[in-house]
Image: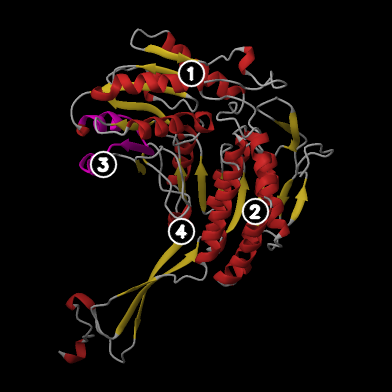
Amino acid sequence: MRDDQTEPLRHYVDGEWRSGHGTETFETVNPATRETLQTVHRGTEEDVSDAVSAAESAVEEWRALSYIDRAEYLWDVYHELRDRTDELGEIVTKECGKEISEGRADVVEAAHMVELAAGNARHPHGDVVPSEIPSKDAYMRRSPKGVVGCITPWNFPVAIPYWHMAVTLVEGNTVVWKPAEQTPWCGQTVAEMFEDAGIPDGVFNLVQGYGEAGNAIVEDDRVDTVLFTGSAEVGHKVDEKIGGRAGRNACCEMGGKNSVVVTDAADMDIALHSTVMSSFKTTGQRCVSAERLVVHTDVYEEFKRKFVDLAEDVTVGDPLSEDTFMGPLADEDQIAKFQRYNDAVRDSDDATVLVDRAELDAEEIPEGHEDGFWVGPFVYEVDADTDLDPFHEEVFGPHVALVEYDGDIERGVEIQNDTEYGLAGAVVSEDYRQINYYRDHAEVGLAYGNLPCIGAEVQLPFGGVKKSGSGPPHAREVVEAVTERTAWTLNNSKEIEMAQGLSAEIKTDEER
């Protein structure tokens, strides 16, 4: 667990730490300083194949355990997460750059997810279904799919892996996991927790690496289900590859182009607090971050003035400092993408730039962190009918459009829904009729009222509609993806009686 390691991080396959088949390594860096944190063995297709073989071999023994016995391993993980929250939160912050309270929250959320999955082992499972035949019992049973592949992102490098894997394991599946290449140290800590818990060999497997390792998981027909969280571009490729293969399925949570609708009945303090959190927390690098603020004309000028003031002043700094609100972006690719979209706005006749802190002044960058991936908020205003790409495509950074609307709540929701995505959204209003209209008509998988457009309590499903997803690969809803359902009917009578009035009489030629 040190950042002064002497040996590259390895894969964890079939209960062993392995260097793997390849000879290449890669480095993970601190986004705030660009200092190297870890060197990591780069996984190959052969490494993934070994991991899948181990997972496949472990399926029968693992699924033969009771729910409660499987959950016992997860309880050990839960206690380690709670005992080491501060330590692991610092690793999250060092490796992905989000400020320290978010680093700790990432670990706490992971603990909550494990608690939910392990606790559920002692809850009732299945459904008793009434039969129209009194002598019959009918009910639903679930069985594990088998081998589940998990591909997770860098922005929640501890929480999301447990979103995927905790329920999956308790339900009786085995796992092959590829964490994001930006956060392999976090991946190592997660694997060490399963090893510490003594989970049987082959039940949990980790392969570090890049896209080719993730693709190998998707391409391997022995992987029954793939759980994916990441970009829409990659997620839809996963869907396409698995969609035509019998017996396999993918459950993908992807990006969004999320909005907060601020109505004429909004409380201004709540509106400002909610939108600043929605747009700039995690430096805008949440899949639920709001990149469009849709504000009613009656309150638009006041909101714009106050929001701009806050965006100009929001604290960018060392993510390990408790005084920091925004840390750096994750890497050079994020910087390039952010600046490309900012340039498109600057060059457009449709938009007016209101805040441009995209390239911070030297005095705004914390001392000793001059080489980090530093940016500040970028805010512009634009009409709702613009065809400007940054208004319609996910930027994944502190890049925010203000849109003024006139009319009723219907118009605000219409603007929000005018996107290919449908992950998350929020409404700010003191009028319950407006809130209820939003609730009933917003095309999103996650909705918030008088709150920031962020947050993921683990007892709720987390996923989107439209281009944003194909089912939540998290929390209770992931059960659908990682289990098979059997509708079981048992006859308790000595006679055969059928539903729907179907005759059960066997007729033969001798009776004619």
Q: Position of residue 154 (x, y in %)?
A: 59, 37
| C-alpha span from label 2 to label 4 | 23 Å
The amino acid at mark 3 is: Ile
Q: Position of residue 42 (x, y in %)?
A: 71, 37
Look at the numbered discs 2 and 4 and tell me whether their residues touch, using CB distance below 8 Å.
no
Mark seen at residue 435: 3
The amino acid at mark 4 is: Val
Q: Secondary structure at mark 4?
A: helix
Mark seen at residue 479: 4
Label 4 crowding class (10 Å Cα cut-off): few <14, some 14-19, many 20+? some
Q: Secondary structure at mark 2?
A: helix
Of callouts 3 and 4, the N-terminal one: 3
- Is 216 on the left or on the right of 120, as rendered? right
Mark seen at residue 312: 1
Residue 493 versus residue 82 in the image, above or below: below
Looking at the rendered image, the disc whose residue lies closer to the viewer, 4 or 1, is: 1
The amino acid at mark 2 is: Leu
Of callouts 2 and 3, the N-terminal one: 2
Label 2: which residue?
Answer: 81
Q: Nearer the viewer, residue 445 or 240?
A: 445
Looking at the rendered image, the disc whose residue lies closer to the viewer, 3 or 1, is: 1
Look at the numbered discs 3 and 4 and tell me whether their residues touch, using CB distance below 8 Å.
no
Q: Position of residue 477 (x, y in %)?
A: 43, 55
Look at the numbered discs 3 and 1 and tell me whether their residues touch, using CB distance below 8 Å.
no
Q: Secondary structure at mark 3?
A: helix
Part of the protein shown in magenta: 411-440
